[in-house]
Structure formats: C-alpha cells, structure tokens
Image (tube, rainbow, N blue to C red):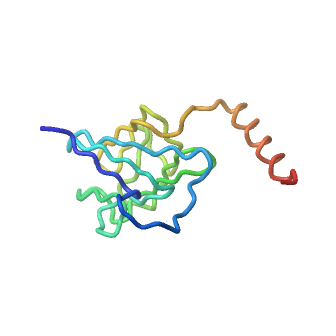
Amino acid sequence: MTEKRVIIGHGSHSAQGPHLPMPAGFVPLRLRVEAERVTIEVACSLAVIGRHTDTDIRLAYPDVSRHHCQLRFEDGQWRVQDLNSVNGIRVNNVPTAQATLYAGDLLRVGCVPLLVLSATPVRLTKSQAEQNDKLRQIAEVLPD
C-alpha cells in the first residue's frame, strides 16, 4: 500500500489572484499520521485540526474535539495551540497548551500521534531567540 499525501491550504487551481502573502521565511509544515500512512503538508500559515467537517485538518476520532487545536506559522516558527479541547495536546509526551514544533517532535492530538517531519527550521537557544527579538525590534524602527 502506498502512502497518501494530503496538502492543506494550497490546492491546485488556475485562479490568478489575489492570494494572501506568506509570512517571511515561511516553511510548510509536514506531519505524518503513521496509523493511516498519510503525510499532511500544511502550506498556509494557519490551520485548525479537529473532528468537525469545517476544520482544515479533519481527524475523525472520538478523542479529538470538534476544534481541537490550531497550527500557526508566526515569527519564523510553527506553533501549536490547544483550543480548549477535552483531551488536550501533547508534544513529545508532555501535556501543553501551546508549543513550538520542530522536525522530529511527536504531536499528539487527543489519541492521534502525528510525527513532525518538517517544521521550524532550527531550534534556537534562549540567547539566540532573545538576540533575534532585539534585531527584529531594531529593524522595525529603522526607516525603509
């Protein structure tokens, strides 16, 4: 049986525009649902995971809430945030309300394990992240 690949947020079409600009440094998020042999590629900066049919990534399992969590690319990082779900989310088996995702992490949405194949490019140390924040603040006040 071959692996299925699902792309969220970037369907093929011939429409010419207007498209929302992607954030600087955008990198698609790739997740693998091992039990289903499915790879999910999130090619938009915001996606909601849940059991409901109106979510961007639908996981039709009883332990997954209707709107369970959201995936968001911001400030050069992929973040996951729980949306007050009943069974919560875990990153690397640690319960959390929100976290940054990196390649190799295991995201558990309710009972569904999702292996992060690609996400935030590099895990920064605290001092590197603080330095990036300072540089971003300086760049914001400089004239164009």
Residue 49 spot, x, y in % from top left? 37, 58
Quadrant of residue 36 within the rendered picture: top left
Name the side, left or right, on which 65 lies relative to 143.
left
Name the side, left or right, on which 94 lies relative to 32.
right
Residue 21 spot, x, y in % from top left? 57, 59
- Residue visible at 29% across and 47% down in the picture: 112
Which quadrant, please, contains the N terminus?
top left
**Which of the pair 93/137 is nearer the observer?**
137
**Which of the pair 78/11 is nearer the observer?**
11
Seen in the picture, residue 28 relative to 123 is either above or below; the reply is: below
**Which of the pair 92/29 is nearer the observer?**
29
- Residue visible at 74% across and 43% down in the picture: 133
Residue 104 spot, x, y in % from top left? 42, 31
- Residue visible at 45% across and 34% down in the picture: 103
Toward the left, the furthest residue is 1
Name the side, left or right, on which 137 lies relative to 20.
right
Seen in the picture, residue 104 relative to 89 is either above or below; the reply is: above
Which quadrant, please, contains the C terminus?
bottom right
Residue 71 spot, x, y in % from top left? 47, 53
- Residue visible at 52% across and 64% down in the picture: 19
| Number of on-image labels | 0
